[in-house]
Image (tube, grey):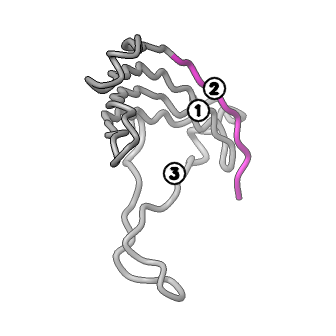
Amino acid sequence: MLNDKGRPYRVSPTYGSEYGVFTGVTVEERQRVSRGGTGVFELGVRDSAIDLESREVRGGVEHDVTAGVNWYPEPNIRFVFDSIRSHAEPSAESLNFGRRTVDADVFIGRAQLYG
């Protein structure tokens, strides 16, 4: 969180067995865009990989790096912006069939109302 105290982590259940989870972002009254504030900004980065090889399936390996910004201008409103850089490397066997590495850049935006 850039301009807030962060997401609280709940270690005891409020009801049922819901515990050990991050709670939602709270946009305080002074931070609301409708009250002259800038909202709350949250940054995130993820590095992930998946092995697509399994027995007779020779899919290779895919590696992704994601960087994102979430903006909460008001309570219950979120705008999400993510940029993803993906690299897929085929298996050695599939290179014999003319498969090549694939690089992709993706930009994703989403508006969300939540309760």
Please tell me whether the stretch drawn in magenta is mainly helix, strand or loop: strand
Q: Is residue 113 magenta?
A: yes
Give the secondary structure at mark 2.
strand
Q: Is residue 2 left or right of residue 91?
A: right
Which quarter of the rendered picture does the C terminus lie within?
A: bottom right
Q: Residues within 10 Å of mark 3 (few under 14, many from 20)?
A: some
Q: Which residue is under mark 1?
A: 80
Frontmost residue, 96 versus 107:
96
Span shown in magenta: 106-115
Dot 1 and dot 2 residues touching (CB under 8 Å):
yes
| Rendered location of residue 91, percent (x, y) | 30, 27
Q: CA distance from mark 3 to mark 1?
A: 13 Å
Q: Which residue is under mark 2?
A: 109
Frontmost residue, 32 versus 95:
95
Q: Residue furthest bottom?
A: 16
Q: Does label 2 or label 3 sit earlier along the sequence? A: 3
